[in-house]
Image: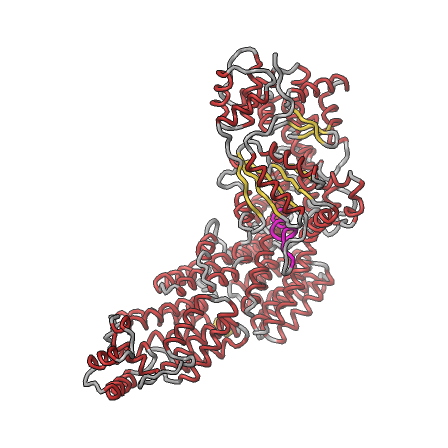
Amino acid sequence: MSQISISAPLIGRDDELGRLSGVLERARRGEARAVLVAGDAGVGKTRVLDEVAERASRAGMTVLTGHCVDLGDVGLPYLPFTEVLGALAQDERFADVLGAYPVVERLLGGGSTGDSGDRLRLFEGIAGLLADLADIAPLLLVLEDLHWADQSSRDLLRFLLSRGILQRAAGGAPTHRLAVLASYRADDLHRRHPLRPLLAELVRLPAVERLELRPMGDAEVARLVRALREGPLPDTTVRRIVERAEGNAFYAEELLAATGSGDGGVPSGLADVLLIRFEQLSDTAQQVLRTAAVAGRRVEHDLLRDAVGLPEEELEAALREAIGRQLLVPGDGDTYAFRHALAREAVYADLLPGERARLHGAFARLLDGRGHRAKSAAERAHHYRESHELAPALAASLEAADHALRVGAPAEELRHLEAALDLWSAVEPSARPTGEGVDRVRLMLRASAAAAHTGELHRAVSLTRAALAGVGQEADSELAALVRYTLAGNLMTVDNLTAAFAYSSEALDMIPADPPSRTWVWAAATHVLAARHVGENETALRVARLALGRAEELGVTDAQADLLISLAVIEGGGRRSVEGREGLRRAWELARSSGNAPVEMRALFNLAVGTFESGHLEECLPWITEGLDRARRAGLLSSPYPMEMRYLHLLVLYTLGRWDDCVRAASTDAEVLPAAGGYRVAPALYVALARGDFRAVDRARTLLEGPFDWMATLVAGIALTDAAALRGDAEAAVERMRSTVTVLTDDAGTRPHVTVRLAALALSAVSDRATDLRLRGDQEGAHRWAETATELLASARALAVHGGVPQGPEGQAWLARAEAEWTRAISGPDAAAWAKAVAAFDFGDVYELARCRLRYAEALLAAERREEAAVEARAAREVFARLGAKVLLEQVDELIRRGRLADAPPTASPLTAREQDVLRLLARGRSNRQIGEELFISGKTASVHVSNILAKLGAASRTEAVAVAYREGLIAPETAGNG
């Protein structure tokens, strides 16, 4: 009988290999590139990558490979990168460069993990390590099966490709001799698969491309089938395999292997083919394969030996048989892997339930006996769960959660905690882990904190509500209060303010103020925040002052700091005042001395916002930098205050006119953080719109998808209202402004402060529409839009002074613009109103100041103050040109042209420049009033210009004047004919 070739040839992939070889060549020249290799299961991704890796190795490149593994609902943070680092650690050539990056040792499970939450430092460390390796020799990094990647691995890959290793040096080309090839199953990516948004993001990067391995043609499959068999094959057999394989190389190989089963038939499904081939093995080899399938795609020799329980000689014989049949392939580090994931899945699915559970239990106990290495906790949790040994599964899940916390993987920590919570009720109380904080309610609170740290604020609320349901009539009133004020705090992050106030009130009522306790103090501190948010300032002040005394009495310095922050915000002039900011500095110092990172970040956030609101934009940036640095060191970059600070950072850069810095910072945030709604995209959206990229409209609309998000709604409201105004769609601008304000209005009827800005943006479109209708002579239509303008202005005025406290410089500036736009809608441009708006935005808002100067120039021109108008128009134009604000740059250029605000060229015409403009409009049949409105002059002045034209041209009528001008070449024929 002819035998199957041990090494399958690579057929029909010349184009793909040529393209990937080109990527390797560019990498060797110092141009870092990445390719995302997509294809259905079995189409040949691994075979192509193996060939490319072999070529790279022959060319002197260092080749590192990491695999992602399907562990079901139990995540294993950074698994493919851990595999890569493990291979490096085994190679003495790289000892020195690996030793230069101790931060990555946490992924190897050795030594101290360092700062638990410093993901950015970890990411930068791995990027630096890869860059240094590429300096030693050109480097090829291969990552297989991204569809199984854990979230932390996806985040790290995003960082590496977006920023860490593919970035261009200033003024030059990429400098790293590096190529990254990453594969994934395209047919596994269902609509909600977590890899989909990452892929969409990565393929937009200039140094990243996508390569899809499509099914092979029939002729290529036939060539493959014939090449795989050493002896001749009947044509009918080849044809049947080609038909069944449908272009999939793996299907073809498995179908060919099944032809030796002796029954002459070919199964219709791949699973059947795999199992037929599997059943051709000896009983011992089948036993080994079943055991290996439970371990996963790859298994170490000694672990497999201990699990299968065979003498070494029998095991080796069975492995040799499986390798000969190409079901297993030997790997580095004395490991074996299934040749294809589908083979492993088919064998695993064929196990009897009891058999599967028994083998999972065996692996779990073997891993237990190996000691608690970094990766074993997640594996043990997986195996114990599948073996239905719930008590050890619970313990391993908690250990895995602790490991995820140490390596800065909050999403995986949350998953492990939720797995533990699922197991909790199924485990006998006597068998549950014990220790401080290890009970169901406290685990829910910890899970809610992990959810908040990873930016899943609604999930945090849900978990805390579950804790509330679990605490029931708990005799421990302090725990009951803790759950309630934690829930109140989480509800405030999703802007459910009325409910937050209700729960904080309950928490405060459940425990006495005397004798003082930490729990009461923190319940009070939370209640102060909630009371302030619902406008109960007197309650907030009273409770804050009482609680501050209790905190001082107990020496609870972090609570003291938190209460001082609240008082600084509420009392007197608030955080905008010098006194308020001084109080915030004192609170920051107390929080820093206590080591409470969240309170310290709250102090820094309020210092930054207070400085911004007082109009000191440059002074705001150091506070933001300090706050984000503290968040980074604490591992809390995705928690609410750091997210607010990131948004504020982008907003300050945007406001100062540092738009390129703003866009770059937004891109950096996206690399190291999970999706964060409007916090990390807002100002970048505003930049895109101003630069004429109206694709930002679609990006803004996506912010409104999914559960309600206050910040995302606000950002989308601003972007979509402004986009409508820039496009001249007054109806859409007004509708978006109204709907946004309605959605953001709280249960008590308090409208958001952004109402002023939204009203001003909508008024811009309304005043344009009213002006256009007046120009056309539609006074009734203009009057209707004037009424809309009055309604919008009333909304702005009502919010500009809220609770008796006027808004800061920014809010007052937007109100001044709203007032000026309203005047323009009612009666036309008013220079005095726009002069006030220009002065109001002079606190540092570069773009909005220029927008107002454009309107001011229009008003000055209408008042025939041409020299002043020219100054304002040129100033606005300089800003728009520098910022790349394409939309308004076109508008100001049109104003300069129409208003003849630039130096006019010499002319032999007897008419002045202004009379030339009037003549052109006469030729279009315009009335004196219409001429005046178009040229920003009064109708009376237009009439004077018309009389002068008639006199200079010796014409008795307007029609004769146009005819004379046409005859003498004073106006172009196409202009004269334009009606």
Give x and y (percent) for residue 527: 58, 60
- Give the residue drawn at x 35%, y 70%: 768
Q: Position of residue 576 (x, y in %)?
A: 58, 73
Image-based side of 967 in relation to 231, left or right: left
- Locate residue 441, reporting x and y percent: 62, 44
Q: Image height check: is 385 above or below 885?
A: above
* Residue in the image at 48% along x and 71% along y: 848
- Is 198 displayed left or right of 319 in the figure? left
307 w.r.t. 421: above or below: above
* Near-viewer residue (152 or 613): 152
**Quadrant location of residue 764?**
bottom left
Q: Residue 210 at what x, y percent from top left?
A: 54, 43
Magenta stretch, main secondary structure, is: helix
Which image quarter: residue 910? bottom left
Q: Which of the two residues, 628 or 975, is positioned nearer the viewer here? A: 975
Magenta highlight range:
157-169
